[in-house]
Amino acid sequence: MAIEIERKFLIKSNIFKKESYKKTYIKQGFLNSHRERTVRIRITDEAAFITVKGISNSSGTSRYEWEKEINIKDAQKLLILCEETVIEKNRFLVKNEKHIFEVDEFLGQNKGLIIAEIELSNENETFKKPDWLGKEVTGIVKYYNSTLSKHPFTNW
């Protein structure tokens, strides 16, 4: 189990697409989306994972995360057991100096929402903010994937 430290931002423009070096389709659902813990099933173009995440700290930047790769066929079966909306998105990876932004362009019931995440080594680590990076939404629960599965962006 490891501590995940990340910050989330909305996006001001699609320039990130030109700067990205990889695009991956992701389909994910939640077996459990309790406030204190989530259990996620994720299938990408290449692999599948089960992930358990703990409650975020008060700033929303840190939480425990455990992840294990699983068989794609098993993951497809587990998606059937997931809660409500299954999330679909395209993830773009964008190198930014020594960091990588993961930019998620949501599809389906969350179409129109684009969120960038950056993982940091500590909560106070500084990083260069690209011009396309918008308002910070770190710790705002409505932007969590587990919340988007219950309250999709198109219903806001």
Image (cartoon, helix red, strand yellow):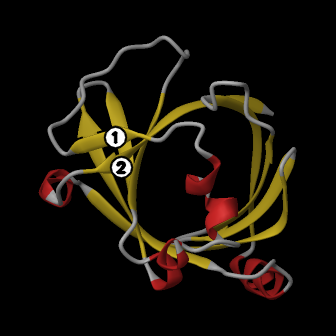
Q: Is residue 104 visible?
A: no
Q: Is residue 41 left or right of residue 155?
A: right
Up the image or down, 54 lies above or below 60; here it is below
Name the residue that disc number 2 marks. Answer: 10
Report how far apart the C-alphas of labels 1 and 2 lie in the structure: 5 Å
Rendered image: mark on residue 73: none
Q: Position of residue 24 (x, y in %)?
A: 40, 68
Farthest residue, direction top:
124
Name the residue carrying label 1: 135
Check contact, mark 1 vs mark 2: CB within 8 A.
yes
Q: Residue at x 30, y 59 (%)?
A: 22
From the top left corner, tell me how far across and down residue 26 is, in percent: 52, 72
- For badge 2, the amino acid type reads Leu
Say which residue appears at 81% left-offset and 78% top-offset.
82
* Residue density around tag 2, few if under 14, some if 14–19, many if 20 or more, within 10 Å: many
Residue 9's image quarter? top left
Type of the residue with mark 1: Lys
Crowd class of label 1 (few under 14; some 14 to 19; many from 20; radius 10 Å): few
Residue 12, percent from left and from top: 21, 51
> Which of 64 and 140 lies nearest the eye of the viewer?
140
Q: Quadrant of residue 143?
A: bottom right
